[in-house]
Amino acid sequence: MARRTREEKFMLKAVQVARRGLEQGEVPIGAVLVYQDKVVASGYNRRLKLQLASAHAEMMAIDKACKKFHSWRLPEGCELYVTLEPCPMCMGACLNARVDKVYFGAYEQKGRSLTAELAEANLLNHKTTVIGGVAERECAEILTAFFSSMRAKQKEEKRLKKEEMESNLPKEI
Ligand SMILES: [Zn+2]
């Protein structure tokens, strides 16, 4: 296997964190926050468990990092690695917390992210550099596997339901 870059290594850590969510039936998205070459906080999507619309991996990691640094403004040089292109809420949180660089793995396929637009809007007088496609294959794989197993489960449930309904129909004599 080709040697991994520094960025890919951190992204693979985010993939590992995503697996924790997977074990709990969450959409597997993971994030790690890196400062001075060390992971200082991590988070994974916990929307189901917490029933919170804001419980995205990035928000979890940023909140933890802010708590650690006792500051809503993260120190200069913080990097966030997330397995899927961040949504506008998370990209906004990165700007608010003054994350300097955002690396993401898989691209959001439906164009709902606005990542580049938000990064360039310079709304808070802070520039966040965004780099996509880091360890993209590994990041996409875990998501694809999750969604295909979910679809298979739904199909099976539908089949069982149909079977049950048919068995309840009045029988011809
Ligand atoms: Zn998000």
Image (cartoon, rainbow, N blue to C red):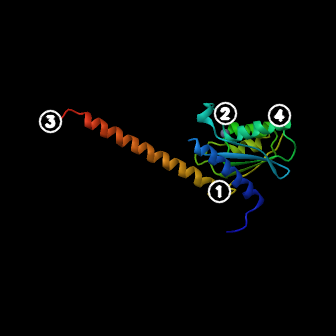
Q: What residue type is labelled 3?
A: Glu
Under mark 2, the amino acid is Ser
Q: Position of residue 54 (x, y in %)?
A: 66, 33
Residue drawn at (41%, 45%) of the image: 155
Q: Which quarter holds ligand 1? A: top right
Residue at image mark 1: 136
Do tag 1 and tag 2 residues touch (Cβ < 8 Å)? no
Compute the Cα span from label 4 to label 2: 17 Å
Q: Earlier in the sequence, mark 4 or mark 3?
A: 4
Q: Which of 117 and 23 is in front in this view?
A: 23
Disc 4 secondary structure class: loop
Sequence order check, earlier mark of 1 and 2? 2
* Residue under pointer 4: 72
Q: Find the distance from the CA under tag 4 to the CA under tag 1.
A: 30 Å
Label 1 CB less than 8 angstroms from ligand 1: no
Q: Which amino acid does label 1 sit on?
A: Glu
Inter-mark Cα distance, 3 to 1: 57 Å
Real-space CA distance between mark 3 and mark 2, rounded to the nearest whole angstrom: 54 Å
Counting residues from the start of the chain, the first of labels 4 and 1 encountered is: 4
Contact (Cβ within 8 Å) of mark 4 with mark 3: no
- The secondary element bearing badge 1 is classed as helix
Q: How far apart are marks 1 and 2 (CA)?
A: 24 Å
- Residue named by callout 3: 172
Residue that label 2 marks: 54
Q: How many marks?
A: 4
Q: Position of residue 15 (x, y in %)?
A: 66, 51
Q: How crowded is mark 1: few (under 14 residues within 10 Å), some or many (20 or more)?
A: some
Q: Disc 4 versus disc 3: distance between alpha carbons?
A: 71 Å
Residue in view at x 87 percent, y 44 percent: 76
